[in-house]
Image: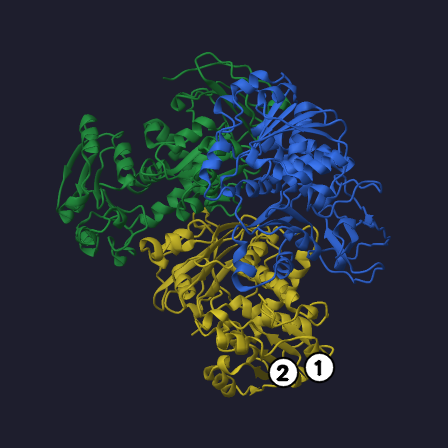
Chain colours: A green, B blue, C yellow
Amino acid sequence: MATSYSFSACMLPELMSRQRAPSSFPGGAIGVKLVHLSSGMMKMWPTSIKNHGCRVRCCAVQTHSAHSFLSENKFQLDDVIEAQQFDRDILNAIFEVARDMEKIEKNSQGSQILNGYLMATLFYEPSTRTRLSFESAMKRLGGEVLTTENAKEFSSAAKGETLEDTIRTVEGYSDIIVMRHFESGAAKRAAATAEIPVINAGDGPGQHPTQALLDVYTIEREIGKLDGINVALVGDLANGRTVRSLTYLLAKYKDVQIYFVSPDVVKMKDDIKDYLTSKGVAWEESSDLIEVASKCDVVYQTRIQKERFGERIDLYEEARGKYIVDKGVLNAMQKHAVVMHPLPRLDEITVDVDEDPRAAYFRQAKNGLYIRMALLKLLLLGW
Amino acid sequence: MATSYSFSACMLPELMSRQRAPSSFPGGAIGVKLVHLSSGMMKMWPTSIKNHGCRVRCCAVQTHSAHSFLSENKFQLDDVIEAQQFDRDILNAIFEVARDMEKIEKNSQGSQILNGYLMATLFYEPSTRTRLSFESAMKRLGGEVLTTENAKEFSSAAKGETLEDTIRTVEGYSDIIVMRHFESGAAKRAAATAEIPVINAGDGPGQHPTQALLDVYTIEREIGKLDGINVALVGDLANGRTVRSLTYLLAKYKDVQIYFVSPDVVKMKDDIKDYLTSKGVAWEESSDLIEVASKCDVVYQTRIQKERFGERIDLYEEARGKYIVDKGVLNAMQKHAVVMHPLPRLDEITVDVDEDPRAAYFRQAKNGLYIRMALLKLLLLGW
Amino acid sequence: MATSYSFSACMLPELMSRQRAPSSFPGGAIGVKLVHLSSGMMKMWPTSIKNHGCRVRCCAVQTHSAHSFLSENKFQLDDVIEAQQFDRDILNAIFEVARDMEKIEKNSQGSQILNGYLMATLFYEPSTRTRLSFESAMKRLGGEVLTTENAKEFSSAAKGETLEDTIRTVEGYSDIIVMRHFESGAAKRAAATAEIPVINAGDGPGQHPTQALLDVYTIEREIGKLDGINVALVGDLANGRTVRSLTYLLAKYKDVQIYFVSPDVVKMKDDIKDYLTSKGVAWEESSDLIEVASKCDVVYQTRIQKERFGERIDLYEEARGKYIVDKGVLNAMQKHAVVMHPLPRLDEITVDVDEDPRAAYFRQAKNGLYIRMALLKLLLLGW
């Protein structure tokens, strides 16, 4: 349910920060996110506590900023919670900003557009790779970071505080929250509470939307298009939230053909297959990796997740060795095709593949930086 | 014992930093704290190793700074160790700076007054909330932070190094130390050793002076005065260092009336009662929260600290449910009154209280930021 | 084997960052390190994957920078991996820069020469002291830091990723990597993989080259020379990598006389003794600390490492009390001589020694800051 309101806003100094405005808007439990902008611009929009997806920025007053151009027909981005919140158009728009970020990052002078902004990385479980990527993104844009890797310690797990109370405290110290949590749905709850933007950096078995975005961005950068591509998803398709989210996003594009190549014990689940079918996306299962690889633009390999096998190490070992991307697979692949992997990789891609220009996984990791720079810029400064 | 010395200081470049000056002052074991100021100003004062409380800045040469105005009759602040070190006048002066900090924080441009300064957060036990608050304060003022949450690892606990040796090392890397320690008195020892300012961010069952300051600041901001107020202290009064420190500070004001409302097992201890009596502060114990709430300006609720009950979970459960601040208590309260809580809160304040404007606890947490910004500014730049 | 190449480089924006250039240089497996410089200058040099020691910067185009003067006959510094990589001339050159850093650090304005640069502290085992020293060095020069103290979590130890893969990911987020690892040789492997500079902050029982550098720097600062000095190495000479590295570096100077003073169970090993003999450095073992101290310029005390004694606490206790630097030893020492210690210290130097001006160990710790500032500057900006 998308709702739209209209306000007149002025530059009252008292209103220029992250404060709760009177919640007296029609249409239910509505608050207002006020984000102060270093550019001297103020954004104000009503936020539905219940229905996070329908927040609409109602009003913006631009004073003298050049770098955060606002037009009424641009997309609204308040929080980044799940891959499903993005459609083709907004993905394209984000990718455009990400390409700008590539230029900024490679530029020797760096950028200061987020100078004065403070990001809190609120990690309830450690994920150094993801955390460093976000913190690098923030710092490459001139912003500052408050880090916590043991957020559990001041949460319900420790003394019984609710996530909502923690968020209310942390938002007093920062301008944007990047949260990793062990519970599915935690990011949505945080965003419903926070008056500042929230980015989901993974919530349990749930979502990891920035990974999904960087995967799609990488395919576009490497292959040059997203419509009409053939993609092989290989490895642990039952447990990997990465491939699930990617499948979901690929369904937004035309004439995509998906091949699932996985050991029997970790096959793609029916919900995703049914979803693809309902969206008219062609898919099939195969046990012939070489044959599939020869037809695909993207071979997306994943790690068999040992931790899901419990004591059945025998099953794990069997699954693990089954589909390896090696020189043989590379040789079958087309010249323009690429190998991707969300990392970390064990031996499901052999090391001798690394030097082939079609090995895209380290470029893919680097793209995570550009996507996160883009999201931070969009959430803090707007389009 | 306040001592005053006089120096002539000049801007010798060789002296412009955190160096030990010859300790040849009359009056015992005296060193000198030299703090370099980004404003181009230098402070110099003798420091008594034994008697931390009596340090007096003896001399200051102002060259061309506008933002760190110095006058001879302003207060001296070298370290922040315990609530008792502050009197009414210095509290008022700190609060004035804290109000300036509110304006800076809300200002879209932020501040750079601590640009070039480095704060070390030396935490011997984790306290994410307090740490983030200090680090946000430093960064909001343009300063930088060195973080450690596992300071135990390079302390006596690990290889047997003394706190004093650790401090001597860390002060070589930073301009100010914010320390949390598990031992009462640790902050005082650190301050006696360090030639740079030290802030106590909690030392065991001892002191947590910045929490006490933000509590008093919050009362003044919310109620508009500190003299003549009625305050209810509710919950775990035996174990909470917060309420003990607050009581101590409240005794500095006139016509304060304090009500203690707590389960029998966690009553306020006699030392504080005796102290209040000796200071002429009126206090009484009550078991009627509604009745007390109706008379008070501030209802200060606290969490029953489960960790103090050991295996007597039954006693904990009994104490815990006894005095809850809920809609009923709110209804009894006056319009101008507020509910405070040092956080984290479990269910001793029900969630439906949050939306009432008299629920001041998240504003209180935010005030911690302003108080800490003020203290960092005062300790590094002076008044 | 030193190799030299020549390139013509131009300021193509596309090339201005940390990208792999075509590896088509003569002489084997050669890549190119491209480091973007905030000064607008670009460095490019071929890097031998196999033979780290022989990397040579081939070309540099200076545009408008004043602070990173380049001359063709200056030394090349790509990574800092082991004490052995430095000769007298490069040590002198580094020390000269370190002395400049002392001036910068004491200057109230600080420096911004590394503004825009990002250092990743990738610590596979915690070492707060070393980490804070590097992070302070980076921030004193205006640079920024990405911190991880639990790098194990995204390494082989956790999910089986190789160090090489981790390095390839982290180098995408940063401009320089400071790594501490539990395995000997890890830093060398990291440097062979990374296209950005790597500094070894200790790899297991292997190397800790910045400690060795700061020790030699301290001797020169305190004594005024390195040729012709007498040095006593005291304490745990069997297990201390510090004294081993220091011995190695001292062998590069003329007429150095070394005395080993240690309990029998932790004597200096034969490999170092043989090395000194082969280099013509005079050494002898002694059990008379007082007599040795009276003859030496430097008394370098070390901690007996309890953790190496296993269950033989009796042997540890016996070794530990044997050679203590106390007032008695001080009284025997010459006026210009100094006591050094890598810290942390337990009671192998008594606390009453601290106030003597010859107690150089806290100045020594501080010198670590200057050495690390110098190395960061040299690796990121060149000479």
Q: Amino acid at mark 2?
A: Leu
- At mark 2, the secondary structure is helix
Which numbered disc, 1 or 2, marks the residue that appears first in the sequence? 2
Q: Residues within 10 Å of mark 2 (few under 14, many from 20)?
A: many
Q: Is residue C122 left or right of residue C129?
A: left
Q: Quadrant of residue A239?
A: top left
Residue that carries the numbered disc 1 in the rendered image:
C332
Q: Is residue C295 above or below residue B197?
A: below
Quarter placement of the N terminus of chain A: top left
Between the C-alphas of marks 1 and 2, the distance is: 9 Å
What is the x, y in percent for residue C61? 52, 57
Q: Is residue B348 visible?
A: yes
Which mark is drawn over residue B32? none
Which mark is drawn over residue C289? 2
- At mark 1, the secondary structure is helix
Q: Residue furthest top?
A: A26
- Between C303 and A2, the residue placed more toward the observer is C303
- Between C185 and B247, the residue placed more toward the observer is B247
Q: Amino acid at mark 1?
A: Ala
Identify the residue at image location x=68%, y=59%: C103
Q: Quadrant of residue A275?
A: top left
- Please say if the residues under marks 1 and 2 sit with CB atoms less than 8 Å apart: no
- Between C114 and B310, the residue placed more toward the observer is B310
What is the x, y in percent for residue A359? 28, 51
**Marks 1 and 2 share the same chain:** yes
What is the x, y in percent for residue A225? 28, 36
Identify the residue at image location x=72%, y=79%: C331
Q: Is residue A221 above or below residue B332?
A: below
